[in-house]
Image (spheres, rainbow, N blue to C red):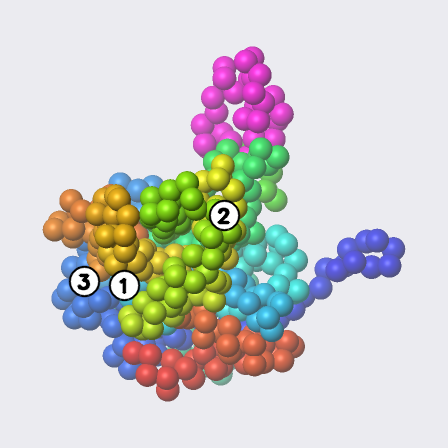
Amino acid sequence: MAEEDGSLKETNHSIAIAWPWDLLSWLHRKNHLLQWASNTPQADIVIAENRRYWRALGNEESVQNLNLQNPEMTFPIFWHTDGVRVYKQQKCWIYSYSCANKKGPSLSSKLMMLLVREPLIWKPFTHDRIGELVGWIQRVLQTGRFPATDFNGDPWPAGSAEAGRANNLIAGGYMFAFSGFKGDWEARVVVHKLQRSYNHNNICEHCPASKLDTAFNYRNFALDAAYLDVCFTHAQFMIMTPEHLRSSWQSVPGWTKDRNLEETCASVSVACCVIPALVCAHFESKFGDALTLKQYDRLLQTEVWQHYKAWCRKTKVPGCGHRFTLGRFGRESWGTQPELQSCYKAYTVKMMIYWLHAFLFDVQAEATGGPERVCTSYALAKMQFDFDMSGPFLTDSMRRDAVTYEHCYQDEDLMKQLGRIASSCHPSTMDKVTCNRYRALLEFGDVF
């Protein structure tokens, strides 16, 4: 906070937190815990899923650092960080978590921990403090018992509810260990300080280690650059990295640079290019050289857009509100390659994968190359379908049809609900009221 003399004055703001052990304990008491954690909520199957998950990742440094005592009773936890719009012009950061074994609607598979308004965030210190808090929470959850002390290590006040349940089981013997962090690139930048440009010092896009000495910077393209002769290990880079440039998530048990997990390439990069490219290829094949950019734009806004909206209504999928145009398809000129613009978010793009196949199937007879485009769109949709229908790992029957492991597909139902709740709150009480209303939504909203 800036003072009149130009100095900075540190100010503290309390933030309401929906403590994970409270929600997880409530889920266990209401017999919803297994439903939250697995697509097959049967105790023996859940135990087998946990055992299989930790065995599959057994060679990972992160899992070895966890030193799990009872893997079959330990749920793998993904942490999520994302922003949500409130009041149309403001933004809040939401931290949530889910079980890696569960696939399905985010409203019933992700649980919110806290919400903090963007104007209250002092970057990077606020996110650093939250990272330290997550580290303490994960150390507690991995024991499977309620915390015996508070975040600062002090005992709970005598006679308090926290003191009364200290060291009691949270969920009947089940434990919860960190498995991965998921977030978009903006979240990685603000949470883990993972900048992506030659003007920054990160040695890779996952890692908090930096290369501050200009002689060893990779942006040095000279043939005698020092990094061509001397190669530091990751551990050496970490030692040379100042404390303020490191991610505070190093305090989270099991967090390593390899556990900053990606969204699938199909949704984030490949589909963003394939979808507009196939649509454009259809019209360019249909009209040939007679097609003008003005006609192109009109076709996207009418024929293609109307087909998309009709498909959304038919399949009961929430459609986006950004009408298709040449600009949003990245085709403003004949010399540019089609690519969806950032206004189309991940969930919208994932649904557009399925719509693309439906559209090309309906119009395949109108232009040459139609069947080939239909086959291409089907391959993309089939891969996405395999990801959507599998658990954290693909089954043996699906493995031959897909290309990678550990895809966690989430929609935006949770963020949409939290955005609505927060937008109806006063800014000064938004975090507290949102936590209370979110808890009421879980208990009375028929979520589970």
Residue at the disc numbered 1: 102
Q: Is residue 308 above or below residue 277?
A: below
Q: Quadrant of residue 73?
A: bottom left
Q: CA distance from mark 1 to mark 2?
A: 45 Å
* Label 2: few (<14), some (14–19) or many (≥20) C-alpha neighbours in 10 Å: few
- State the residue at coordinates (54%, 59%): 130
> Residue 233, percent across and down?
45, 27
Q: Is residue 270 above or below residue 72?
A: above
The amino acid type, in three-letter code, at marker 1 is Lys
Q: Nearer the viewer, mark 2 or mark 3?
A: 2
* Label 1: few (<14), some (14–19) or many (≥20) C-alpha neighbours in 10 Å: many
Q: Are marks 3 and 1 in contact (CB under 8 Å)?
A: no
Q: Nearer the viewer, residue 57 or 94?
A: 94
The amino acid type, in three-letter code, at marker 2 is Leu
Q: Is residue 234 above or below residue 136?
A: above
Q: Nearer the viewer, residue 66 or 275?
A: 275
Q: What is the number of the mark on residue 281?
A: none
Asked whether residue 218 is drawn in magenta, I would say yes
Residue at the disc numbered 3: 47
Q: Nearer the viewer, mark 1 or mark 2?
A: 2
Range shown magenta? 210-238
**First in sequence: mark 1 or mark 2?**
1
The amino acid type, in three-letter code, at marker 3 is Ile
Q: Secondary structure at mark 3?
A: helix
Q: Is residue 255 left or right of residue 335?
A: left
Residue at the disc numbered 2: 293
Q: CA distance from mark 2 to mark 3?
A: 58 Å
> Residue 252, percent across and down?
44, 53
* Label 3: few (<14), some (14–19) or many (≥20) C-alpha neighbours in 10 Å: some
> Residue 32, percent across and down?
27, 77
Q: Secondary structure at mark 2?
A: helix
